[in-house]
Image (cartoon, rainbow, N blue to C red):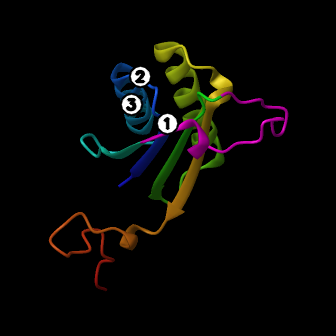
Amino acid sequence: MPLVRINIAKTATADTVHAISHVVYDAMTRVANVPANDKFQIVTRHTEDELIYPQEGYLGVTYTPNIVFIQVTWNAGRTVEVKQAFYKAVAEGIAGKTGLRIQDIWISLVDVAREDWSFGNGEMQYAPKAA
């Protein structure tokens, strides 16, 4: 775990996609204590009409067609402070490495139980230990 889904405009360059991928992975390992080499990511490129967001903005944040939606599914249990630090590290890191606006980095976290994963072989690698 985790599984990262990155939804981005079709016009984004390969360098931008790679930078976003790296920043998210770095923040997961550095800030959120994700193990090294635990890098499972799905990048989907979209035409402009497939990335829908409020044109008038939301909660004081305005967006552009360069919006990047990032959804991270990971094990539950991280504190609010860790999550806040993760949001900040990802948004600032992507803005710094790509030039994308920090306002256009939209992040959602999905907390799941450890037994909600199979990393292959039809096995539950994080199965609860028998008593």
Q: Position of residue 28 (x, y in %)?
A: 43, 39
Q: Position of residue 4 (x, y in %)?
A: 42, 47
Q: Which residue is mark 2?
A: 16
Q: Are marks 2 and 1 in contact (CB under 8 Å)?
A: yes
Left or right of 121 on screen, residue 23 = right
- Kindly state the secondary structure of the residue where label 2 is placed: helix
Q: Would you say residue 49 sits in the magenta stretch?
A: yes
- Kindly state the secondary structure of the residue where label 3 is placed: helix
Q: Which residue is mark 3?
A: 26
Given the image, on which type of amino acid does mark 1 rest? Ile
Given the image, on which type of amino acid does mark 3 rest? Asp
Numbered label attached to residue 111: none
Query: Looking at the image, which residue is at 37% across and 73% down?
Result: 115
- Comparing 19 with 44, the one in front is 44
Rate crowding at label 2 as few (under 14), some (14 to 19) or many (20 or more) other CA atoms within 10 Å. some
Gap between marks 3 and 1, in whole Å? 19 Å
Q: Would you say residue 72 sits in the magenta stretch?
A: no
Q: Which residue is mark 1?
A: 8
- Kindly state the secondary structure of the residue where label 1 is placed: strand
